[in-house]
Image (cartoon, rainbow, N blue to C red):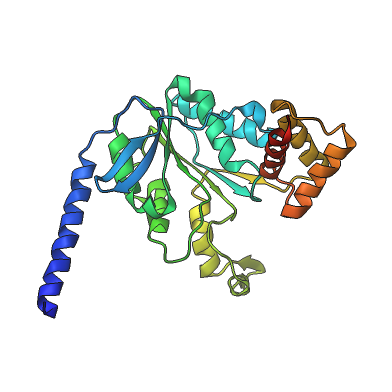
Amino acid sequence: MNESDQFFVRANRLLERWEALLEGRGVAPDWGHDAFRWRHDQHGMRLVGVPNPHRVTLDDLLCMDTQKAEVMRNTEQFVRSRPANNVLLWGARGTGKSTLIKAVFNAFVNRGLRLIEVEKEHLVDLVEIVETLAGRSERFLIYCDDLSFEADDPGYKSLKAVLEGSIAAPAENVMIYASSNRRHLLPESKADNQDVHVIDGEIHPGEAIEEKVSLSERFGLWLSFYPFNQAQYLEIVEHWLQRFDSGSCSDQGTRLAALRWARQRGSRSGRVARQFAIDQAGRCD
């Protein structure tokens, strides 16, 4: 097969894949589900129902009362068709950012709230997703976990457009809730902070910083999550030990084991606390 024939074979394969994607857009979602994922597969791009979504309760989230109250208030406004903001939860890993989103969804699911998980590489499809949801009576949270971008990521501009940068008005029944370890969602370098200008005694950020801030500031509600101190970590450990009926931190051996577990992982996060309790529960006879 010569190079010309190889080119046409590859072109035909690309056309077949593109036709499959277009066909997938026409497949109606099963709206009987509470939670969905946006998928790319052999059937095209589509919303796929999640038959067994993670049922997290707000009572299982400790040491974040302010963050819980703010996200609950904002989501209550959204569910009641009142003005509400897109939400960015940013901060240290393992501190409950994504879990809080899932817990808030579960708190309002009986009032018509639905959750759609979209992976970062599929954010370029946000316009299509929002169009799919147009006219529905349900309220939808588009959930983006562990969100961060490089400067040339195609999903970066798509997210900016859907948040507030498009000629089209924002969808009335859609909100975006995202979690990230980065406050501005993009990597920041020392050189960015050196590119500043002083005009009439005021400091003005350079173009690089302005561009990086332009996405995160489109989220109307920012909530910060910081690493837990030792007392908070042990409080969370105690909660999960009680939940799994696997001991208590009042026992000196268990307390020391929990602290040793955190040191080995270099983190006193809520995730590490729960993993320790799971390990303890597995050891119990």
**Visible residue check, residue 234:** yes
- Tell me which residue sits at (80%, 38%) in the image: 234
Reply above or below: 251 against 98: above
Q: Residue at x 22, y 37 (%)?
A: 27
- Based on the displayed image, in which of its 4 quarters is residue 152 positioned? bottom left
**Image location (x, y in percent) of residue 70:** 61, 33
Q: Which quarter of the image is occupied by the C terminus? A: top right
Question: Up-down: is 196 above or below 268?
Answer: below
Left or right, 285 with respect to 131, comes to: right
**Residue at horizontal 74 percent and vertical 35 percent from the top:** 236
- Nearer to us in this view, 190 or 24: 24
Q: Is residue 63 visible?
A: no
- In depth, the one of 123 and 213 nearer the eye is 123
Determine the residue located farthest toward the right in the rendered image. Answer: 252
Q: Position of residue 240 (x, y in %)?
A: 71, 32
Of the 4 image quadrants, the one containing the N terminus is bottom left
Outermost front residue: 285
Looking at the image, residue 12 sits to the left or right of residue 35; the answer is left
Total number of numbered labels?
A: 0
- Nearer the observer, 256 or 96: 256
Q: Is residue 274 left or right of residue 205?
A: right
Nearest the camera: 174 or 101? 101
**Percent position of residue 230, x then y:** 82, 44
Q: Position of residue 185 (x, y in %)?
A: 53, 56
Kindly give the residue lying farthest to the top in the view shown.
110
* Res 129 → quadrant: top left
